[in-house]
């Protein structure tokens, strides 16, 4: 399965996906696209010999023209799946619908709790005893698409957002490759009813 990854930053999730692909995963990261030229994930991609492209949203006057070029760039690589891996741009419904059923995101909370930003601090502020990460299909609603897989941990008394973020990130690195593996094997899909289907077959 050909996968294009969109990033904005460190790319540690991208790294986990590249590692899984290199270790016999049924998918291949064929390109990495960042909206920021200084995203460290671009260096990870280049180090692995994967095309690393920059499409800076600040060079555009609005979302639609940016997304038109983004879509052209993505589709040049003919992916069967697009993954958002810390891509910090809100996407329009038209863009998202073009990739309906073939775009995944990883979000650092137990969705539907804490959509959006600052999830770790918000979980602490809400005195959550559990927190975690979710992989979901992308739909026009921000962080609102059907959840495919979650991992959870117990919040430690007195811990801060930084340690919580780090611990959640280690969970992300486990569940994102797993979800991609399922999708690549044809076991995971978005059903016509809008719910995710996971086929347990051999
Ligand atoms: C992760 O926490 C991801 O869930 C969120 O942004 C962060 C990206 O981290 N959407 P990285 O760039 O993969 O290291």
Image: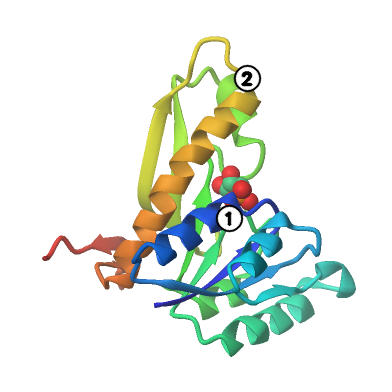
Which is in the foreground here, disc 2 or disc 1? 2
Q: Which residue is mark 2?
A: 160
Q: Please state the horizontal and vertical placement of residue 147, each as a whole percent of the image.
A: 39, 52
Q: Quadrant of the N terminus?
A: bottom left
Q: Is residue 177 above or below residue 21?
A: above
103 or 55, nearer to the observer:
55
The structure's colour scheme is rainbow
In this rendering, position of residue 30 left or right of residue 191 = right
Q: Which residue is mark 1?
A: 142
Q: Element type at marker 1?
A: loop
Q: Is residue 92 above or below residue 159?
A: below
Q: Residue at x 64, y 77 (%)?
A: 51
In this rendering, position of residue 139 left or right of residue 200 = right
Q: Please state the horizontal and vertical placement of residue 84, each as a whole percent of the image.
A: 56, 62
Q: Residue at x 49, y 54 (%)?
A: 16
Q: Residue at x 51, y 87 (%)?
A: 78
Label 2 and label 1: CA atoms lie apart by 26 Å
| Contact between labelled residues 1 and 2, with CB atoms less than 8 Å apart | no
């Amino acid at each position: 399965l050909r996968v294009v990854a969109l990033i904005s930053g460190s790319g540690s999730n991208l790294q986990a996906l590249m590692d899984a692909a290199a270790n016999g995963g049924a998918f291949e990261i064929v390109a990495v696209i960042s909206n920021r030229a200084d995203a460290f994930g671009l260096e990870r991609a280049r180090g692995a010999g994967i095309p690393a492209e920059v499409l800076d949203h600040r060079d555009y006057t609005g979302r639609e023209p940016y997304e038109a070029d983004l879509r052209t760039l993505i589709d040049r690589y003919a992916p069967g799946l697009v993954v958002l891996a810390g891509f910090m741009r809100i996407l329009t419904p038209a863009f998202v619908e073009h990739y309906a059923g073939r775009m995944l995101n990883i979000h650092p909370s137990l969705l539907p709790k804490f959509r959006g930003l600052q999830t770790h601090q918000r979980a602490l502020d809400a005195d959550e005893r559990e927190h975690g990460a979710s992989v979901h299909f992308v739909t026009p609603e921000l962080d609102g698409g059907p959840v495919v897989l979650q991992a959870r941990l117990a919040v430690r008394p007195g811990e801060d957002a930084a340690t919580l973020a780090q611990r959640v990130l280690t969970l992300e690195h486990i569940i994102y490759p797993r979800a991609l593996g399922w999708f690549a094997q044809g076991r995971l899909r978005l059903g016509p009813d809008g719910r995710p289907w996971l086929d347990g077959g051999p």
